[in-house]
Structures are given as structure tokens and as C-alpha cells.
């Protein structure tokens, strides 16, 4: 579903933000991206969202390949992905309802269906009664819930969340995280960059730890076990080949020479 293959990303002035990263995220997975500030988490999300293109390697998301982008691919991809950010990025001059409706309208939803769908989404994120409030009239946790409702307008197959609880207190953090878990339980994959060790500790989701643009550990790398087994099998085969060759040498040496 999401596959990064030997991806390197270099920015013009700051240099290498990702360094030969390979990664697969399966349908419906919940993945934490963690690591210190500057380790490459946001860059990884931007590459998945195709806001940035890799300098080397390939990013594939739902059949769309960064190396062979066709006209309209990015727009198609964005309709299947939801994104939320630490700073919510709501339109301040529109109500919660209008923020979500706007996202629906730009994707060409039939106008008569919009209000009911927006109400359903706001109810889903626990804000049924706050639709007419403007962002500044909502708490941080509520604003993030509106942003999540907006990210869900197209029933995305994955929700990318860049430090979504970074500006929230503990209580709001727990609420937003619980909502993300529910969204995931209903089938949407979630890739969430976070510094919040408490969240990491309290759940056993796959955790990818980054440092200096590299993945330093990945608790859910099921491929790692397969690769290790393949390596062992290769080592075994090589050892057998060497043993056979030695055996061959011994029998040849032992055999008396006979003219052809
Ligand atoms: P994190 O999300 O883990 O804090 P980032 O992906 O934001 O890490 O940053 C990784 C590195 O890439 C940093 O050294 C940062 O300065 C650099 N970087 C990120 N975005 C840009 C950009 N738009 N232009 C130039 N350099 C960038």
C-alpha cells in the first residue's frame, strides 16, 4: 500500500534529510514514527503525501509511483489520503462545519449531500454540537478533531498525522489518540509522527524509530524475519556448495588418474 524503496531525500541547503530508507506499510496498519526533532519524520510523511519527491529511490502509494508520475496522479492520491498537522491548519474565518464542508466541496461532492455528510463527520469526532463555532472558539483538542473530520471527508485509506498531539495537553492528547485508534479500528491505516513517549508506551503499535534520516529500529518489520531466514538459507546453500566442492576435490584427489 505504501512502499519506500531506497529513498534518499536531499534538500538544497540543509542536505540529506532521509538516507536510503526502505519501508512498507500494509493496509490498515497503525504505525508510529518517532525519533528526535530533525530525524526525518515530517520529510517521510511529505514524501508519502507526495508534497516532496525523493532525490533517489522510489515512493509508491496506492499504485502511484513517485518515479513515473502522470498528470493528475497527485490530485488522485490526495483524494485518497487524509493529513493532519500539529498546528491544525483550519481556516480561521470559517466555522467548524464550513471547514469540513469546504474540503468536501473542493473534491466535487454533490452539494445537497454536503451538510448531512459534514454533520455525520462532526458527530464521528465528538463535535456534533460545535459545528457553528469558529476555530478560535474551540479548544486545541476540538480544533484537532475538526481537522481530523476534514481529513476523513474522502474516506481515505490512510491518515497521515504529523505530531497531531504536539500542541495539546494530556487530556486532549488522550482524546485525539483514542479517536485515531477508532479510525484505525474501522479500517483506515494511520501513520503518526510523534514525540509522545507516553502514547508509545501505552500501546503496542508498530514503532519506527528514526535518527539522522535513517530507520534505526522497526518493531513491526515482518520483512526483517523473512530477510533473516532468506539470508540463513543463502548462507546454508553457500556452505553446502563449499562443502560439495571440497568433497569433490577430495574424491578427485583420491581417485587414481585414468586416461580419458
Ligand atoms: P522531523 O520531522 O523528524 O523533525 P524533518 O523531516 O522536519 O524532521 O527534518 C529533517 C531534516 O530536513 C532537518 O535537517 C531539516 O532541517 C531538513 N528539512 C526539512 N524540511 C526542509 C525544507 N523544506 N527545506 C530544507 N530543509 C528541510
Image (cartoon, helix red, strand yellow):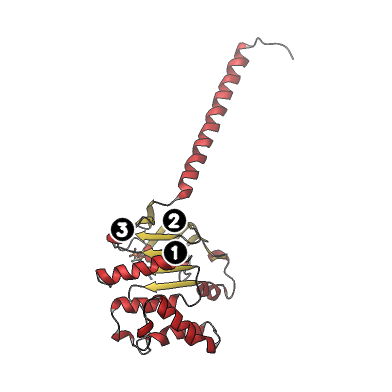
Q: Residues within 10 Å of mark 1 (few under 14, many from 20)?
A: some
| Mark carried by residue 21 | 2
Q: Earlier in the sequence, mark 3 or mark 1?
A: 1
Q: Quadrant of residue 164?
A: bottom left
| Mark carried by residue 185 | 1
Marks 3 and 1, Cα distance to the nearest angstrom? 16 Å
Give the residue at x 50% y 68%. 157
Does residue 165 appear anywhere in the picture? no
Determine which residue is flagged by label 3. Answer: 202
Asked if the residues shown at circle 3 and circle 1 are in contact, with their CB atoms under 8 angstroms apart, the answer is: no
Q: Quadrant of residue 13?
A: bottom left
Q: Residues within 10 Å of mark 2 (few under 14, many from 20)?
A: some
* Residue 35 x %, y %: 32, 59
| Mark carried by residue 100 | none
Give 228 or 132, whichever is nearer the viewer: 132
Q: Is the residue at mark 3 in contact range of ligand 1, meaning its CB lies under 8 Å from it?
A: no
Marks 2 and 1, Cα distance to the nearest angstrom? 28 Å
Amino acid at each position: 500500500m505504501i512502499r519506500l524503496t531506497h529513498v534518499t531525500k536531499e534538500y538544497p541547503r540543509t542536505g540529506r534529510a532521509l538516507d536510503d530508507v526502505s519501508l512498507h506499510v500494509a493496509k490498515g496498519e497503525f504505525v508510529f514514527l518517532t525519533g528526535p526533532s530533525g530525524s526525518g519524520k515530517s520529510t517521510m510523511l511529505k514524501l508519502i503525501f507526495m508534497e516532496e519527491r525523493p532525490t533517489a529511490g522510489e515512493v509508491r502509494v496506492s499504485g502511484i509511483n513517485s518515479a513515473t508520475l502522470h498528470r493528475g496522479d497527485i490530485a488522485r492520491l490526495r483524494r485518497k489520503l487524509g493529513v493532519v498537522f500539529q498546528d491544525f491548519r483550519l481556516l480561521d474565518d470559517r466555522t467548524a462545519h464550513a471547514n469540513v464542508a469546504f474540503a468536501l466541496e473542493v473534491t466535487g461532492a454533490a452539494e445537497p449531500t454536503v451538510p448531512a455528510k459534514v454533520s455525520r463527520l462532526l458527530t464521528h469526532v465528538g463535535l456534533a454540537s460545535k459545528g457553528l463555532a469558529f476555530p478560535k472558539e474551540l479548544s486545541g483538542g476540538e480544533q484537532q478533531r475538526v481537522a481530523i473530520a476534514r481529513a476523513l471527508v474522502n474516506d481515505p485509506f490512510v491518515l497521515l498525522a504529523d505530531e497531531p498531539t504536539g500542541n495539546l495537553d494530556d487530556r486532549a492528547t488522550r482524546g485525539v489518540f483514542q479517536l485515531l485508534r477508532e479510525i484505525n479500528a474501522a479500517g483506515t491505516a494511520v501513520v503518526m509522527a510523534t514525540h509522545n513517549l507516553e502514547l508509545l508506551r501505552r500501546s503496542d503499535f508498530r514503532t519506527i524509530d528514526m535518527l539522522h534520516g535513517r530507520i534505526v529500529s522497526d518493531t513491526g518489520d515482518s520483512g526483517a524475519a523473512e530477510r533473516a531466514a532468506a539470508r540463513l538459507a543463502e548462507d546454508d546453500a553457500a556452505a553446502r556448495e563449499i562443502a560439495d566442492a571440497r568433497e569433490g576435490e577430495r574424491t578427485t584427489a583420491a581417485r587414481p588418474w585414468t586416461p580419458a
